[in-house]
Amino acid sequence: MTTIDVKHIAKLAELPLTQEEEKKFKKQLSAILEHIEKLSSVDISQVAETSQVTGLENVDREDSASASFSQEEATSQAKIKHNGLFEVPVILEEAVE
Amino acid sequence: MYGLTIAQARKKLDNKEISAVELTKASLQRLQSLDKKLNAFLTVTEETALESAKKADERIKNGDSTPLLGIPFSLKDMYLTKGIRTTAGSKVLEDYIPQYSSTVVEKLETAGAVLIGKNNQDAWAHGSSGENSDFGSTTNPWNTELVPGGSSSGPAVAVAAGIAPFSMGTDTGGSIRQPAALTNIVGLKPTYGRVSRYGTIAMASSFDTMGHFTKTVEDSAMVLSVTAGKDAKDATSSPKPIDAYTKDIDTSIKGLKIGMPKEYFIDGMDEKVKEATMSAIKKLEELGAEIVEISLPHTQYAIDIYYVLQTAEVSSNLARYDGIRYGNTREFFGDEAKRRIMLGTFVLAHGYYDAYYKRAMKIRTLIKQDFEKAFEKVDVIATPASPTTAWKIGEKVDDPLAMYLSDVFTVTGNVAGIPGLSVPAGFVKNLPVGMQLLGPMFGEKLLFQVGRQYELATKWYEKEPNL
């Protein structure tokens, strides 16, 4: 039976969890994974994968420019802005010489 | 004036018996008088509704008569509406005002339908009861202590309570057909790709379909004739021409072969619901159809592969909510979204991908093939839409697995991509039961014909909740 490392998965998914939540989710997700276990008994040796059901392939369109949002419209829903731009958290620290 | 079907309202509008403004006011009045009890609406668009109703009246005066012109409707809060708050039922988007509208909304506006508001729903369309909304549960008009089903809880209740003649929902695993069944109305999940997904908040992109609720099958066909079609903005929308959906719905179903899959009449489901569905199928036989017992052998795996593939897609689609470009940060996700993001992240993680995700994609093929083989033998498949009638609010909230299993009869349609129509099929202890009709890819027209003949013979849709 597979166990789920909730702490690690939450980190991968950028989900801040309390310790209490970690405990609760571990229990609930383990029950779901246990239910899913029965999939391992299906013979899939001769079966191809289905990733989409449309049967459509290589759908393309004219590569032409058209009107889009103004900068003001595009940034209108951001909570934090700087000089009309999205402000994002720092992800790289400047190297200290 | 509330509780009209689209067809009835259409006639009255075209005969100038009523105006679109009057019809819209009646809808808004009904909404205001009931919504404390039902909690089906998150946003009411009274001002713009009256403006579009006025415009519709102008068009009617000038001799324009399209199916939805001047008809009030509401939208699940998954559909982006330019300038009107769109929340997906989640606190993450509680103050999000979209800069553009979804294709479906644009089509309905062009057709002259009148938007009266945005509906409550399970947050991000995750759920089967409406209880996962971050804005409180919606209640069932047949008994307000019960859930209305979900995730399109608000849209279903808007129609079931006679507030709007139609509403738009989304169906990724049964989120239209199941609440329709639990509230005595008609719910259509179209074929994947029949209706554009552009501008609708994505849940699981390879399963999401844009469908609707109506009181009758006839109305359902009228709505699809407006929403269906290829959209350059959705590469998965089908270039296949759309059918004349309302044509032939009055044709007898004599000689049609209707499959009854044994895997959908199982132990563990409500016996009375099973009986009600069997007698609905018996009715189809009386109407001249031939009932054929069939088998869809991989049905038992559908719910499990769905909770692998769907959560994988959810974890990817919800990764975009970082609170930078719009909306709040990830702390605002509710429990169910967190569960699905984590399950999806887990099945896609290094070391588990082959055992879960890849394996599930292969079993998806087997389920699709089950249906392809079945439709070589039968025209339409008839099943229960839900294993039970509506349940008590709170009964399943701490048991996500039990909640997931309520989609057991609807999820197969999304796995295979085929269309499904839920039609009212009677009552068990005064609570509605729905029959699900499944058809081959792009077989909506056939579903409407069978559904229409059944509703004309039974008239379950005429029964209304006592509110």
Image: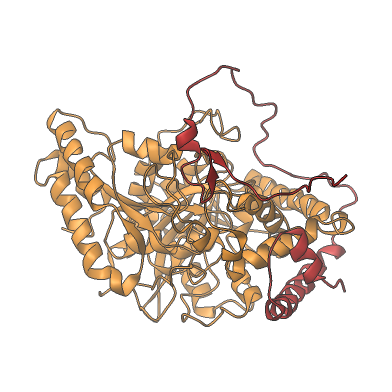
**Image vertical order of residue B241 relative to residue B31, above or below:** above
Q: Quadrant of the N terminus of chain B?
A: bottom left
Q: Residue furthest front?
A: A97
What percent of the width, then of the height, locates residue B17? 9, 45
- Based on the displayed image, in which of its 4 quarters is residue B339 positioned? bottom right
**Image vertical order of residue B405 relative to residue B62, above or below:** below
Question: In percent of the image, x 57 and y 62: which residue is there?
Answer: B126
**Image vertical order of residue B297 relative to residue A22, above or below:** above
In-image side of B149 versus B351 (left or right): left
Q: Residue furthest left?
A: B17
In-image side of A7 versus B409 (left or right): right
- Based on the displayed image, in which of its 4 quarters is residue B19 positioned? top left
In-image side of B289 versus B213 (left or right): right
Q: How is the image coloured?
A: by chain
Question: In percent of the image, x 33 and y 48: which residue is there?
Answer: B219
What percent of the width, then of the height, locates residue B195? 49, 39
What percent of the width, then of the height, locates residue B359? 83, 54
Q: Mark yes or no: residue B255 visible.
A: no
What percent of the width, then of the height, locates residue B357? 79, 54
Q: Colour of chain A?
A: red
Q: Colour of chain B?
A: orange
Question: In percent of the image, x 38 and y 36: which residue is there?
Answer: B106
Query: B306 or B289: which is nearer to us?
Result: B306
